[in-house]
């Protein structure tokens, strides 16, 4: 039986920036807001956290800061994926030394490895550290898909502790449960599908929306975990307009704009991501 790193809500944290680098004062405000809402876990340095433009030293400092600040009040899952297997394994090992509770490892992107390559990639990371690892399948961003059969093979590794599934096909959850077993942790990676994924057996969500509305997302996942699907449906539908707006431009451009509009400014995105457009900014302002 695989022991899940968390059940319920995990926030894929944005990374606050200022003119000098990571803005740790803004990060503290963001973290306190999350902890006050009672979220179960936080991803530090994931793709929503602009991992692609974080220096390695910045990423490790970010992980270490989150571990110290949260001090066991929420699980800290380090975003250590990449398309260079050696570097990904080294970063995973460093995150373990810093006290992270788990890893979130996106599939290699751009070089687009085969399914055998995915097996070898994740096996190498698993050999570097025994820290529990959540696979991350997001083919719309990487152009690489973890096929269900490959996931079933990876599920046999002791340190593979689930998958964040961002393929919009809800049917994949049922296929994964069939091939990997009902105890293999599956997490929703799409805020607009939290309820249907959890109704099919997912244990929770790794959420972008919960940067802004952690209490609301936690209420939704809590209801779904209790099997209160009518209540969960109402909570899901309440958030759909905002979720759609947050998906109207490349993540994390809209969520950072929404945080700023809500008084929790986390600074700009790093190039090549540019500021939110006027139309979307006005749409977000109306929704908020």
Image: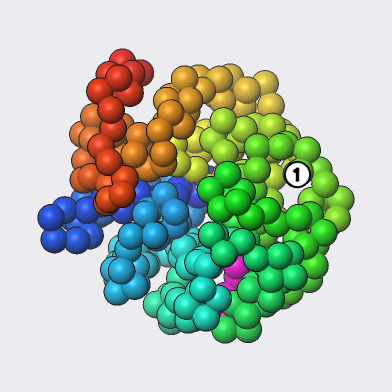
Name above or below for residue 124 compared with residue 214.
below
Name above or below for residue 34 compared with residue 110.
above
* Residue 4 visible to an observer of this rendering: no
Out of 275 and 79, give the one closest to the viewer. Answer: 275
Q: Circle 1 sits on which residue?
A: 173
Q: Residue at x 67, y 21 (%)?
A: 230
Q: Residue at x 43, y 80 (%)?
A: 94
**Can you say which quadrant of the picture contains the C terminus?**
top left
Identify the image's colour scheme: rainbow, by chain, secondary structure or one colour: rainbow
Instruction: Report x, y in % for residue 206.
Output: 53, 47
Question: For residue 132: magenta?
Answer: yes
**85 on left or right of 247:** right
Q: Which residues are magenta?
A: 129-133
Q: Residue at x 41, y 39 (%)?
A: 250
**245 on left or right of 223:** left
Instruction: Provide the major secondary structure of the magenta segment.
Output: loop
């Amino acid at each position: 039986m695989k022991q899940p790193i968390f059940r319920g809500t995990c926030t894929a944290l944005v990374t606050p920036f200022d003119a000098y680098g990571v803005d740790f004062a803004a990060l503290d405000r963001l973290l306190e807001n999350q902890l006050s809402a009672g979220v179960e876990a936080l991803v530090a340095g994931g793709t929503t956290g602009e991992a692609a433009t974080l220096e390695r030293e910045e990423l490790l400092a970010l992980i270490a800061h989150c571990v110290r600040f949260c001090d066991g009040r929420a699980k800290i899952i380090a975003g250590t994926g990449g398309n260079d297997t050696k570097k990904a394994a080294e970063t995973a090992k460093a995150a373990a030394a810093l006290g992270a509770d788990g890893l979130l490892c996106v599939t290699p992107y751009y070089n687009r490895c085969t399914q055998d390559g995915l097996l070898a990639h994740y096996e190498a990371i698993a050999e570097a550290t025994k820290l529990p690892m959540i696979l991350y399948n997001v083919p719309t961003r990487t152009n690489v898909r973890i096929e269900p059969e490959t996931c079933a093979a990876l599920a046999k590794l002791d340190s593979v502790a689930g998958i964040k599934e961002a393929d919009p096909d809800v049917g994949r959850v049922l296929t994964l449960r069939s091939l990997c077993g009902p105890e293999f942790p599956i997490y929703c990676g799409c805020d607009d599908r939290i309820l249907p994924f959890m109704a099919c057996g997912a244990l929770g969500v790794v959420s972008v929306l919960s940067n802004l509305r952690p209490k609301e997302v936690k209420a939704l996942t809590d209801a779904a975990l209790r099997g209160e699907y009518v209540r969960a449906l109402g909570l899901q539908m309440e958030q759909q307009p905002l979720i759609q707006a947050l998906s109207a431009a490349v993540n994390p451009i809209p969520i950072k704009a929404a945080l700023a509009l809500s008084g929790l400014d986390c600074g700009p995105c790093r190039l090549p991501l540019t500021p939110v457009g006027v139309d979307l900014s006005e749409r977000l302002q109306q929704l908020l």
